[in-house]
Amino acid sequence: MTARVISLGIQKGGCGKTTTAGILAYILTKDYHNKVLVIDMDSQGNQTEYLARCDIYEFDGKTVFEGLKMGDVRPFIVSIAPGLDLVPATDLLATFSYWLYHDGRSIYPEHEAMHLRALQKSIETVKDSYDYIIIDTPPHIGEQTLNALVASDYVVVMFESSKFCLSAVERFVETIEFVQGMTGQKLNPKLKVAGILRNLNDKRRTDMRDLIELCGEQYPDWIFRSVIDRTAATGRLALTGFDEVENKELRKAVEPYQDFIKELIERVG
């Protein structure tokens, strides 16, 4: 098997990237019996804390940053549950750009655009060991997000029901086109948009309903049919975790994502 690599991204915070990536990995593993690797490319380390349920500093010196510097993430993979692994992150990942353009120059020569292929190179050794590799990205465009897109087969664009996020989608699509090579150098011409996930919707608010519809009108060929509504159980997952014994409302928390994940699987094959 060769893993399908899927990034979740948008250059705006509060759009549900971490929650969606964690639930996606859990359901792919638990319900579909896949082997999944989650890579935390956000220096906040929220995905690491979300899945590992411990202080991110327990992983000091054993993170994706070290894997990027080594060109191989294998020594830094942490087992979370049967079939579910994680490459953690800490806030030192914020120095990734500095490292790339200083110490990393000899490994990833800038003139070959290899500084944007560091993650791609680092996961080559593990792609045959997983069905899916899920990459959680930071809420901004930079080397971390660009590396994730260059390393990916598919990207899920996250849309939270706000005017600012609708504007961000348009700019993120431009970034995707840059990576695909539509505006110049072909960094990853095979990258496909799996879809736009309309997320964190509050059914009680008419303004959010209008924005959900507007996003669908602007991107009719890309939107997932599924719309994820806010629920308290999902919001509590960061506190209650993914252990079915400890978290009695786990199935309720992940249920809103089932149709989206089924649709995603259909799209990525």
Image (cartoon, rainbow, N blue to C red):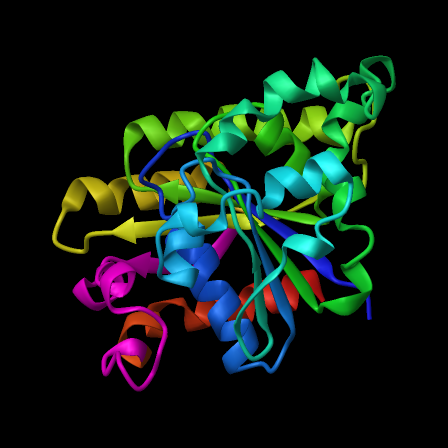
Q: How many marks?
A: 0
Q: Give the image location of residue 115, x and y in percent.
A: 75, 24
- Residue 42 placement, left or right of 122: left
Q: Give the image location of residue 23, x and y in percent.
A: 43, 65
> In the image, which residues are magenta?
222-250
- Residue 81 placement, left or right of 198: right
Whether residue 262 is situated above or below residue 157 in the rendered picture: below
Instruction: Classify the position of the C terminus by image quarter.
Output: bottom right
> 138 or 263, which is in the foreground?
138
Residue at position x 80%, y 15% in the image: 110
Whether residue 16 is situated above or below residue 243 in the rendered picture: above
Residue at position x 41%, y 45% in the image: 57
State the residue lying farthest toward the right: 112
State the residue lying farthest toward the bottom: 245
Q: Give the image location of residue 96, x and y in percent.
A: 60, 26
- Residue 40 placement, left or right of 149: left
